[in-house]
Structures are given as C-alpha cells and as structure tokens.
Image (spheres, rainbow, N blue to C red):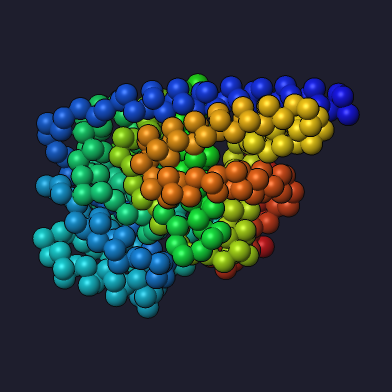
Amino acid sequence: MALAAVLLLMVLAGALVYCVLVVLAARQYLAVRPPALAHPEPISILKPLAGLDEGLEENLRSWFGQRYSDFEILCAVREPGDPAVTVVEKLRQEFPHVPARLLVTGEPPYANAKVFSLDRMTAAARNDLLVMSDSDTRAAPDLLTTVAAEFQDPRLGVATCPYRAVPGRSFWSMLEAIMMNTEFLAGLLVARLVEGVRFAVGPCVAARRQALVKIGGLERLKDYLSEDFVLGALAAGAGCQVILSSAVIEHRIGAQPFRANFAHRLRWVRGTRRSRPWGYVGQLFTYPLPLALLLVALKPAWWILLAGAAVLRACAAWATAGWVLRDPLTARRWWLVPLQDLCSFLLWTAGFFGNTIIWRGRRYRLLADGRFEPV
C-alpha cells in the first residue's frame, strides 16, 4: 500500500502541475487577438446534414445571418427526402441574398459519411477559404469576420474553433457540456502551450483549399473516425500553420438520456485512444480530483492534498469555462464539476477496453491506427 500511495502521490503532483499549466495556457490564448480585417475574401461554408438535430433551424440561421460581405453556404444530405431539406429551403427563402446550394450525395462509399459530404461540397464550392461546421453548431454574427482576419496570414492553412458546449434538457448532457467546457478545452490549450497546435477539433474547422491539396485531399481522411484530429495533424506535418482560432462557437449537444449519452462518450474516448494513444494515456494527469480521492482512500491523513487538488482544479476550470468561454452553465452548476470529473475518469478507464462503437445507429469496428470500418 505504501508503494501505491507513493506512485499515486507522484501522479497527483503531475496533475496539479497540469492545473497550473491550464491557467497559464488560457492566459496565453487570450493574449492573442486577430488583426483588423483589411480585405474580406469570399468564404464557402460547408454544412453536412443528416436529419433534424435539436435546434437545427436556429443553428443554421446563425450561419445564414453572418454579418459578412461575401459568403456562400453549401448543405449536403444523403437523400432528397431528408427532413433537413425542408429547413434549408425555409432559410433560403428567409435569406434570399445569401447564395445557398443543396447537394444530395447519395450513400457514402466509405465509413466516414461526414468526410464524403465535405469532399463533395469542397468540389462544388466556389471559394478558396472553406469553413466546415457541423449541424449542431451555432455561430456569433461576426465569426466569419474573425476567421477571415486570421487567414490574412498567408502561412495559415487550418484554424480550429474552440467551442462552448450547450446542453439540452438532460442531466447527462449537462455533465457532458461541463466536461467539454472545463476538461476538453483545457487539454487543447495546454497542447497549444507545450507543443503548438497540431490538431483540429470537429465542430468548426476553417481551411484553405491549398492546405487540403497538400494533405492529399479530404478523401485521405475517409477511413478515420477522428477525421478532425487527423486533418490538423496532416496539415501541420505538411508545413501548414495550424491555429486555435479566436472565434468561439456554440456546440449544441442536445438532450440525450443516459444510455445514448454513455454510448456517445464511449465512442469519443475509444476514438481518441486510437487517434493519439500516448496522449490518451497522458490524460491520467488531467484528473486531479479522482487521483486525490484515491490517494486519500489509501492515506486518510493526507486529506490536505484533496483540498489542494480541489482549489487548483477550480482555478483550471474557471480559466477555461470562465475566462475563455464565458460559460454560464459552469458558473451556475460549478458544484457538478467534481461529479463530472469522476464520470469522465471512469469513462477514460473504460476507453482502454473494447473496439466497437455505435455512430448514428450503425456499428463500427475501430482499428489500431485510428481508422474504422462497418461491422
């Protein structure tokens, strides 16, 4: 038991250092501001759609209503009878000044249907600067202005937008949103601080067409579950600059019951483990509260370490949710952070086991290199 306590103490010390790094990384991120926009360039927004996500109409309306001088919107569905088509047609009538097109792609010929839709829309897009965003995202009216200002740097190839998760009317989606806003973003910021941005995150990614050409086109991502991460890694490897954008979006995660939410989060952690296996192991250091609880269970006299871990975890959570995201959910439900940390730790542990996932009602097998295939 003494050896286990010493090992846990060493890991906990690393986790406390990580909390300090989160605060420093948040300050560094906030210190960067995009330059003033001198010459707005045309932008193509690409929206892969599948069914009626919760709040889809308002989500899409936020993109149609961008305060930007020159942009088009392309939406893609698998079949003409998709219920999302009705929403798109309604918004096209509401915003007649916005060039908008709807593509019917048919069934994807490979595992990642989202990549297939994006590839088809990229081929049809008129512009060089592409903003790829999921159907469950909601954008501030000046998002395109911020992105265009950042892409005035000719070295920039890919920009990935941080996101503030907004839950639906479900306790489990509330926990997931707090995880995204206090834990997931913290990892992105620390990675940016330590090694630079060599990744992208899926809800909203902007890219130059030339950067996609450099990595071999979007089709190169077709067999990967975490295609966003792979896109950023390939772009960085090809010599393109990749950044974490100053434009923050809303990620509307919906109201999932326990089983659906558990399956969704399990898919996420299993995919992450195969996309960056050593980084996944290193996530152990992002759980100071569960580690401190385990340590105090072994050594109750060391309870002061649990108090210290709680203080530093609170500082790290506020640095991301408060400073960066200005998240009202975490401000109101801050007392759920410890419970969410325990749930997240258990899911992280579960991610080491199993190699199948459920995605939009279909079962897939994950391969060791991050690719996946239908079962």
In depth, the one of 224 and 217 nearer the eye is 224
| Quarter that holds the C terminus | bottom right
| Quarter that holds the N terminus | top right
The residue that appears at 48% across and 50% down in the rendered structure is 333
Does residue 337 appear left or right of residue 181 in this picture?
right
Which image quarter: residue 96?
Answer: bottom left
Q: Whole-percent x and y of residue 213?
A: 37, 38
The residue that appears at 68% across and 27% down in the rendered structure is 305
Which image quarter: residue 114?
Answer: bottom left
Does residue 218 appear left or right of residue 208 in this picture?
right
The residue that appears at 67% across and 31% down in the rendered structure is 306
Residue 247 visible in the snapshot: yes
Q: What number of labels is visible?
A: 0
Residue 228 visible in the snapshot: no
On screen, residue 276 above or below 54: above
Does residue 361 appear left or right of residue 55 in this picture?
right
Q: Whole-percent x and y of residue 93?
A: 16, 70
In depth, the one of 113 and 47 nearer the eye is 47
In depth, the one of 301 and 254 nearer the eye is 301
Q: Whole-percent x and y of residue 357?
A: 64, 58
On screen, residue 238 above or below 349: above
The residue that appears at 49% across and 36% down in the rendered structure is 317
Which image quarter: residue 79?
Answer: bottom left
On screen, residue 281 above or below 49: above
On screen, residue 5 above or below 42: above
Residue farthest to the right, as pictured: 1
